[in-house]
Structures are given as structure tokens and as C-alpha cells.
Image (cartoon, helix red, strand yellow):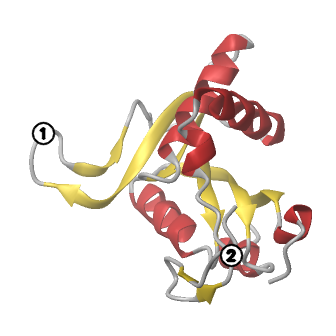
Amino acid sequence: MRTDGPFTLRSGAVSDWYIDARQTTFDGAGAILVGEAVLEALDPAITAVGGLTMGADPIAVATAVAAAARGRSLRAFSVRKAAKGHGTGGRIVGPLVHDDVVAVLEDTTTTGSAMCEAVEALTEAGISIGQAITLVDRSGGAAAAKVGSKIRYVALVTPGDLGVAE
């Protein structure tokens, strides 16, 4: 965590502190810890994990690897910000099938808009969403409300856990 702000967040809000979870999720030892933590919070019915590309990618792969180490089959996927016009195209990348029940992942949540963007793309593709998990939720409850009551929302860490007040 950095406290030498101000920092402009994805939402456009300005904050005195910033968490770049990729400093942990792209580190080998950090990825192991993150994968295990997400797997611990993951509903047993979930068959694939992923979310909006960049933030969710290393979390999804780490979680799938942690699951495989425990003998659980779990696939990772990414949701692109926009469909590509080449290759197989589309917004969703990875080995998803239509009967999957997925968990949408995010590294740091401020408003829940990135998570909702991934949920919308998956829903449009006919994929069922069973859970949404964020590593750090700095939304003060806004993200859980935005995701809605039909998707179980889990935040692994809040600002209070880090000794920071919003």
C-alpha cells in the first residue's frame, strides 16, 4: 500500500492511499497466497474464475493453480474490455463452457463498476455467475450493492483491515 498520494483511481475519485494489488499478484510467493485465499473463499459449485483483464488475470490463474494442487478442477478466464476483431474475437478468453458457474474476481474494488462490466459480458455470453470476490474492497458496501443480491459477494480485505480510513 502507498500513502504518498493523492492518487486518481479508476473511478475518477481521488484518494490519499493506493493499493496496487499487482505488486502481490504478479509475485510468485504473493500469487500463491492470493490463490489460496481466494480458493478458501470460493463456493464449491464454482467451476471457473476470472474477470476483467489485467486486474483479475493473475488472481484467476493463481486460484486455478491452487485448486489443481488440491485436486480440484477449476479453469481461469479473462474478460476483455472490448471484443477483438481477429482470432476467435469476442470478449471472453479461456476454456469456459456454457454450463460453467463462475466467480468474477477483482483485485481492488472502489465502485464495483469493473466487476459489473465483467458480470454483464458473461451474462450476455450465457454464462452463470455464482460469486464475486475482490481482494480489497474500498467501496464501503457500494460494490456489493451494485453486484446485486443474486450474486454472493465476498471481500477478502477492507481498508479497516489495513488500518486505513476512507
Image position of 62 (left or right of 95) = right
Measured in 3D between alpha carbons, the distance from the residue under mark 1 to the one under mark 2, in whole angstroms, is 40 Å
Q: In the rendered structure, which amino acid carries the disc numbered 1?
A: Gly
* x 44%, y 34%: residue: 97
* x 10%, y 53%: residue: 85
- Which quadrant would residue 69 be assigned to in this image? top right
Q: Is residue 62 above or below residue 164?
A: above
User: Could one spot residue 151 in this view of the protein?
Assistant: no
Q: Position of residue 26 (x, y in %)?
A: 53, 38
Q: Secondary structure at mark 1?
A: loop
Q: Secondary structure at mark 2?
A: loop
Say if mark 1 contacts mark 2, CB within 8 Å: no
Sequence-wise first label, 1 or 2: 2
Few, some or many residues within 10 Å of mark 1 (<14, 14–19, 20+)? few
Q: On residue 95, which mark appears? A: none
Q: On residue 17, which mark appears? A: 2
User: Could one spot residue 144 in this view of the protein?
Assistant: yes
Q: In the rendered structure, which amino acid carries the disc numbered 2?
A: Trp
Q: Position of residue 120 (x, y in %)?
A: 47, 66
* x 66%, y 71%: residue: 147
Q: How many callouts does the rendering have? A: 2
Image position of 106 (left or right of 131) = left
* x 67%, y 27%: residue: 29
Few, some or many residues within 10 Å of mark 2 (<14, 14–19, 20+)? some
Q: Position of residue 153 (x, y in %)?
A: 76, 61
In the picture of the structure, the residue carrying the numbered disc 1 is 87
Q: Position of residue 110 (x, y in %)?
A: 64, 76
